[in-house]
Image (tube, rainbow, N blue to C red):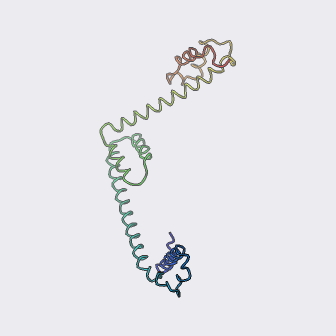
Amino acid sequence: MNNTLTNEQRAARRAKRKNGKLIRSMPLFADALRPDGAMASWLTTPEQELPAVERNRQQAREFGDRMRAKEEKERQQEAEERAKAIEGKTPEQIAFLEKGRQAYPPFGDYGATFWRKSQQPGFLEAQMERMADLQRRGETVRARIAVEGIFRTAEKTHPDWDDEDWLEHFWQHRRELFDAGVLPDYWFTLKARFGDVAVR
């Protein structure tokens, strides 16, 4: 929207558009639909359109004022609910909640709703446990992928190694695969599924 135009300029532009639309809809009467034509009274003028322009502009300003007031109220409500939600929480817990808040749009009443919900008994603990569970699952998946990658090339890289050699190698160099709970069981699961090697 061009906010540099005056209301009079907007009225002139509005009249031009409406008259042009009328003429295009009645091409056989184009000559009559002129300021000096027989159907000139069908045309509108900037003076006639000015009240509508002023009314629309006023409505737009009032709408903008209402939206700004609404947004300010929502910000205040979110700040109040957030203050309640983080009261007594540790910095780590607050950081966790802040990250959860970012998952929702920054506008509307999403913020106040989130912080209000986070005050419910057990909410924070349940969300943190859910996130920890997702992280554990992710670690398990990544560990399994790592083991699979090594298993598929085991015969080529160390054809003389047995299971004990491989597990000792993992223990010395990839301890996190044991910490993730993937080894040693997944190594034997792959052997049962594919045999001694997956790629021959």
Q: Is 58 located above or below residue 102 in the figure? A: below
Q: Is 76 located above or below residue 187 in the figure? A: below
Q: In which quadrant of the rendered view does residue 177 lie?
A: top right
Could you tell me which residue is drawn at 34 percent across and 59 percent down?
A: 73
In this rendering, position of residue 144 left or right of residue 152: left
Q: Is 46 located above or below residue 66 in the figure? A: below
Image location of residue 148, percent across then percent down: 59, 23
Q: In which quadrant of the rendered view does residue 124 lie?
A: top left
- The residue nearer to you, when weighing 25 against 128, is 25
- The residue nearer to you, when weighing 175 against 15, is 15
Image location of residue 95, percent across then percent down: 42, 43
Q: Is 151 located above or below residue 112 in the figure? A: above
Q: Quadrant of the C terminus?
A: top right
Q: How many marks?
A: 0
Could you tell me which residue is drawn at 62 percent across and 20 percent down?
A: 151
Q: Which residue extends farthest left?
A: 121
Could you tell me which residue is drawn at 55 percent across and 15 percent down?
A: 188
Image location of residue 197, percent across then percent down: 63, 16
Q: Which residue extends farthest bottom?
A: 36
